[in-house]
């Protein structure tokens, strides 16, 4: 390779990296605004309905479209220009918030409108997630994938975690109408960042005829591809199980803490979680090129399981805060390393389909966790942990009895589920040896010459 070619290649890589980080920064603003709005609306639902079941039902319904549409969206991400997909999807999500703000301004806000426009936003997210995941390998060199994924997790994770603290601080001052305005500004920043970048398109190695090959066939391809890769398929099952436990804990967090903490204290605990994500993310970016990514992921998942089990035993913001800090500090490590493994092992031109399918398999645990947690909380665990309740006889001496103690017991159960998943994954050779058994993919963009 000539010196001139090497310099040109270096400039191209630098430009792609800059575009990636600009894209992630812009998307973080939209996530921050949407998360602030989501938290504020969640408080509105709890205050107006006093029902955990309805609270979790709305969350589940608003999540379901992205779960169901994942494989279809992923197939279209591989067919279409990924930059245009992101642009249209972010614009659609922004429009849904604009409509909801207009309805609120007319004094007509209700559960039905929250669900309708939540569904629209969820449909847009179904395209955004696989588009970003599939674009990363095209914009970031393999040696820097873990760091780039960590930066993505940190920026977006911080946006989601800091949202409750910001919302708790701003709600009293600017009310819900001001929150909607912030969300719209966040989306506009994201749209501007996407307009200003270029995302390379991968060459087509699967020889799919767009005119003849149906979307359903491409979805089936994703399923058959994963089934043929036993290690990746089992890894997907593991992540889905862990995600179920984490999401269940997340949906219980607000109702649990409302029993012994103020909104400001809840915001403080969330800020502590944000500090954990920042610390974990910085550590991953500094030591991102970990050799044994799967093993490290399993170890950090075990740490999370123990944190879930022990942090909610006492009704204290200190114990919950410590647990949240450990969980969120471990989270960037798990997400960045696991995402890196998938990006390195999958051909770039099939990543949209695979990531869309994976998002559905993992994502289907979200509405299940929401609905199941709400029903179990209101119908079994909370009544059972009242004075004289059935569960109080077993767990009362450890957790105490009264409001919120059933939720604490549920959290402990989800921690045990996570620990069991870690043990089973560690014992399976296809998961343990995945990095050795499955070769890394080649990354070639349209217009480039495939390396020998």
Image (cartoon, rainbow, N blue to C red):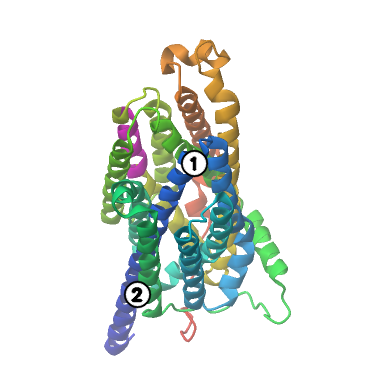
Residue at point 28%, 47% (across, down)? 169
Q: Look at the picture and state if 47 lies above or below 312.
A: below
Left or right of residue 214: residue 293: left
Indicate which disc residue 48 carries: 1
Q: Which residues are magenta?
A: 319-329
Q: Nearer the viewer, residue 333 or 231?
A: 333
Left or right of residue 445: residue 179: left
- Residue 341 lies within the magenta run: no
Q: Is residue 430 visible?
A: no
Q: Look at the picture and state if 353 lies above or below 169.
A: below
Indicate which disc residue 19 carries: 2
Residue 151 percent across, percent down from the top left: 33, 59
Q: Is residue 323 visible?
A: yes
Mark 1 surroundings: few (<14), some (14-19) or many (≥20) residues within 10 A: few
Distance, label 1 to label 2, CA atoms, is: 43 Å
Which of the image's four quarters has the N terminus?
bottom left
């Amino acid at each position: 390779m000539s010196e001139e070619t090497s310099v040109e290649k270096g400039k191209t890589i630098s430009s792609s990296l800059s575009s990636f980080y600009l894209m992630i920064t812009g998307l973080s603003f939209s996530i921050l605004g949407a998360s602030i709005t989501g938290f504020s609306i969640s408080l509105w639902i709890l205050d107006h309905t006093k029902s955990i079941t309805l609270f979790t039902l709305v969350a589940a319904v608003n999540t379901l479209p992205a779960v169901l549409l994942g494989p279809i969206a992923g197939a279209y991400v591989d067919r279409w220009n990924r930059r245009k997909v992101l642009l249209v999807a972010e614009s659609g999500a922004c429009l849904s918030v604009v409509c909801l703000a207009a309805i609120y301004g007319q004094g007509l806000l209700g559960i039905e409108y929250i669900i309708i426009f939540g569904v629209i936003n969820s449909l847009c997210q179904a395209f955004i997630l696989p588009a970003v995941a599939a674009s990363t390998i095209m914009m970031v060199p393999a040696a820097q994938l873990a760091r780039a994924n960590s930066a993505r997790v940190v920026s977006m994770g911080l946006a989601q975690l800091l949202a409750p603290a910001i919302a708790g601080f701003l709600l009293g001052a600017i009310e819900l109408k001001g929150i909607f305005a912030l969300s719209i500004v966040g989306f506009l920043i994201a749209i501007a960042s996407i307009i200003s970048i270029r995302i390379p398109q991968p060459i087509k190695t699967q020889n799919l005829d767009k005119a003849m090959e149906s979307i359903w066939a491409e979805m089936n391809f994703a399923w058959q591809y994963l089934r043929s890769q036993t290690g990746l398929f089992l890894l997907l099952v593991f992540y889905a199980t862990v995600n179920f436990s984490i999401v269940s804990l997340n949906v219980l967090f607000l109702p649990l803490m409302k029993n012994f903490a103020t909104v400001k204290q809840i915001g403080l605990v969330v800020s502590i979680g944000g500090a954990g994500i920042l610390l974990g993310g910085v550590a991953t970016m500094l030591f991102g090129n970990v050799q044994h990514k799967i093993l490290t992921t399993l170890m950090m998942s075990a740490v999370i399981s123990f944190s879930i089990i022990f942090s909610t035993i006492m009704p204290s913001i200190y114990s919950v805060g410590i647990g949240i800090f450990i969980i969120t500090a471990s989270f960037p490590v798990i997400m960045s390393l696991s995402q890196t493994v998938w990006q390195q092992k999958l051909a770039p031109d099939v990543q949209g389909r695979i990531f869309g399918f994976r998002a559905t398999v993992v994502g289907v645990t979200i509405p299940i966790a929401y609905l199941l947690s709400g029903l179990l909380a209101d119908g079994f665990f909370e009544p059972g942990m009242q004075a004289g309740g059935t569960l109080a006889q077993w767990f009362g001496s450890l957790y105490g009895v009264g409001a919120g103690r059933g939720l604490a017991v549920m959290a402990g159960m989800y921690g045990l589920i996570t620990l069991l998943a870690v043990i089973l994954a560690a014992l399976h050779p296809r998961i343990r040896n995945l990095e050795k058994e499955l070769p890394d993919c080649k990354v070639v963009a349209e217009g480039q010459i495939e390396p020998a």
